[in-house]
Amino acid sequence: MPAGVAIRRLEPADAAAFRDVRLAGLTDAPAAFGSSVEEEADKPLAFFEARIAMPPPGAIFGAFVDGRLAGIARFSVAAGVKKQHIGEMTSVSVLTAFRGRGLATRLVDHVIAHASRHVVVLRATVVATNGPARAIYLKAGFQPFGVEPRALFVDGRYYDEELLNLDVDRAAPVLS
């Protein structure tokens, strides 16, 4: 990892920076997320603190560049005894000014490494037309297993989501 870049689990003290990155992602790429900036912009800081404070092994990880939060990725475990072997990666986002530096790839790799200690399967979704994000997931070893047609409706347009699966007990992520 280049000097000045660190990835770590976010803490409640990171809530304001997390909110800023989250809202920037929702604004810059509204079709990439199931939520919208309108739904989250007026939420109090306590809302974002609560999202960060999820019980382990769930976590929101941040990519910090020279101490500034530049990207995020969320890991959660499915609810229910019969599904606790399944993890989900969501909310992967990098601030526009920091794109093209491999931060999203590093975040994805970090979540995979974390997931491999807690679950057998890691799932993710990606808007089918989001080529750059899709490429990151496929390079990390995710395999498509279906498409949810018209999964999102944004600005008068429907977007299909591709469903992705990674058997993390067989994956050997290389943290860059």
Image (cartoon, grey):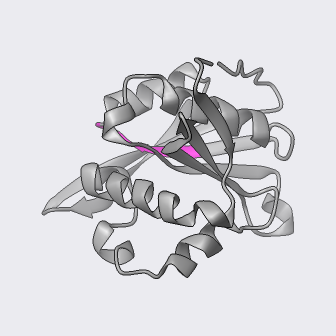
Viewer-nearest residue: 145 or 13: 13
The image shows residue 72, relative to residue 134, as above or below, that is: below
When asked about the image quadrant of residue 142, the answer is top right
Q: Main secondary structure of the magenta part?
A: strand
Viewer-nearest residue: 161 or 35: 35
Viewer-nearest residue: 51 or 173: 51
Q: Is residue 24 visible?
A: yes
Q: Report the quarter where the N terminus lies.
A: top right
Is residue 90 on the magenta stretch? no
Q: Report the quarter where the C terminus lies.
A: top right
The image shows residue 17, relative to residue 160, as above or below, that is: below
Is residue 126 on the magenta stretch? yes
Residue 79 in picture, x, y percent from top left? 75, 68
Task: Return the residue found at the far left.
Answer: 156
When asked about the image quadrant of residue 24, the answer is bottom left
Residue occupying image coordinates x 54% and y 71%: 48
Residue 81 in picture, x, y percent from top left? 86, 66
Residue numbers of the magenta segment: 124-129
Q: Is residue 92 left or right of residue 58?
A: left
Q: Is residue 137 visible?
A: no
Q: Is residue 137 left or right of residue 31?
A: right
Residue occupying image coordinates x 42% and y 53%: 21
Viewer-nearest residue: 162 or 118: 118
Residue occupying image coordinates x 49% and y 43%: 71
Residue 62 in picture, x, y percent from top left? 59, 45
Query: Count the marks: how many?
Result: 0
Residue 63 in picture, x, y percent from top left? 57, 39
Q: Is residue 117 left or right of residue 100?
A: right
